[in-house]
Image (tube, rainbow, N blue to C red):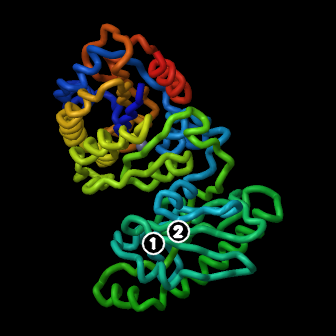
Amino acid sequence: MKILFIIIDGLGDKPIPQLKNKTPLEAAFTPNLDSLVKRGICGLIEPFFFPWQKNPRSDTAHLALFGYNPRVYYSGRGLYEAVGVGMKMQKGDVALRTNFGTVNKNQKIIDRRAGRISDTKPLVRALSGITINGVKFLISDSLGHRAVLILRGKNISEKIGGGDIKKIGIKPQKIISLERSKEAEFTAKVLNQFLEKAHQILVRHPLNKKRKKQKLLPANYLLVRGPGKLKKTPNFYQKYKLRAACIAAGHVYKGVAKVLGMDLVKVKGATGNIDTNLKSKFSAVKRNFKKHDFIFCHIKATDILSEDGNFLGKKKFIEKIDKHIKSLIELRNTLIVVTADHSTCSQLKRHCETAIPVLIYGNGQDSVEKFSERACRRGKLGKVKQIHLMSKILKLAKK
Ligand code: ZN
């Protein structure tokens, strides 16, 4: 059987008093998802996260969902962001996620997003091609105020701290080495030099002078975090003998998929936001099964709405997904899996460790009738660790 893997980011939630103590998924009217549940099997997933993460994060959770142990293969968010924006990572490179931020005359951060600047291309161009002590700095713009920075050279280490602890009113953190190695100390030193040089260039840049005149915050400092390096990772096809494709708009999801060797499918109108075009995403799913055996389809809006505390919007968006998912039920000889990378609790406005509902349609049946956190507890699949889900799916797809 072919496998369709639909990840509704941040789907799970906790009961909400304003929804009569139901979760957004429970409160949502989902006749199509429920019909898959009635004819399929359900369970709950325990999300993976490292103790230092405190809560699940999308990158490590996706690795676990695909059956790649993050303890072995994870190497920092920067890597996935870099690959996701289309930068070519070479062996030994270190990549960092970057924000264009604003510091004042005293070098204190006053805005981590430089007034949510939307086009940083001229700034990125001004920072390109800088080399310090044999280390080349490559930078690419990403969505809005975001960018990705790659350090390329000999003896570069990812064992360094970031400059951004997500606080304002303080100076950016000096980059420090996290281990006593020549490589990490050297990397921290050259990165600090680069960040200072970048600051000098950005302060004088015409775009920032123009922004100041327009009473907009200048994008005058690079706030970096999440260093990551390529690790030797078995390709999805080598590992599972499945030709895999990824339909996602967010860079980190595309990055994880690309690192695992999945083909990236471009879809018109897919934005990775609440305005995403689900119809074209799901048509792309159907088209791409001609050439692929495994399709990972990612939907981000539910996570964004939960992080905004918008549980009603989340409920409505789940209903929208339900409406569009109808077109996929007709797929033949395909195991349909619907789940999430983690739960996002709308009242806490952040990712949370609440177990995630999963439904698998196409082989087997249990007595669950509604797709929800509570109902899936009684499913035949039971409680599964995220890292073990893929092997369960493969077994079901083989029968
Ligand atoms: Zn996520």
In the rendered image, is residue 56 in sight? no
The numbered disc on residue 22 is none
Residue 134 in the figure: left or right of residue 162: right
Cα separation, mark 2 vs mark 1, equals 6 Å
Front in this rendered view, residue 289 or 281: 289
Q: Which corner quadrant of the image does residue 312 belong to?
A: top left
The location of residue 238, given as percent across then percent down, is 61, 38
**At label 2, which amino acid type do we have?**
Leu
Q: Which residue has dot 2 on it?
A: 223
The location of residue 81, given as percent across then percent down, is 50, 58
Front in this rendered view, residue 86 or 275: 86
Q: Residue at x 49, y 46 (%)?
A: 262
Of the four image quadrants, the one with ligand 1 is: top left
In the image, residue 46 above or below residue 223? above
Secondary structure of the residue carrying numbered label 1:
strand
Crowd rating for badge 1 (residues with CA inside 10 Å; few <14, some 14–19, many 20+): many
Secondary structure of the residue carrying numbered label 2:
strand
In the image, residue 393 above or below residue 124? above
Q: Which corner quadrant of the image does residue 336 belong to?
A: top left
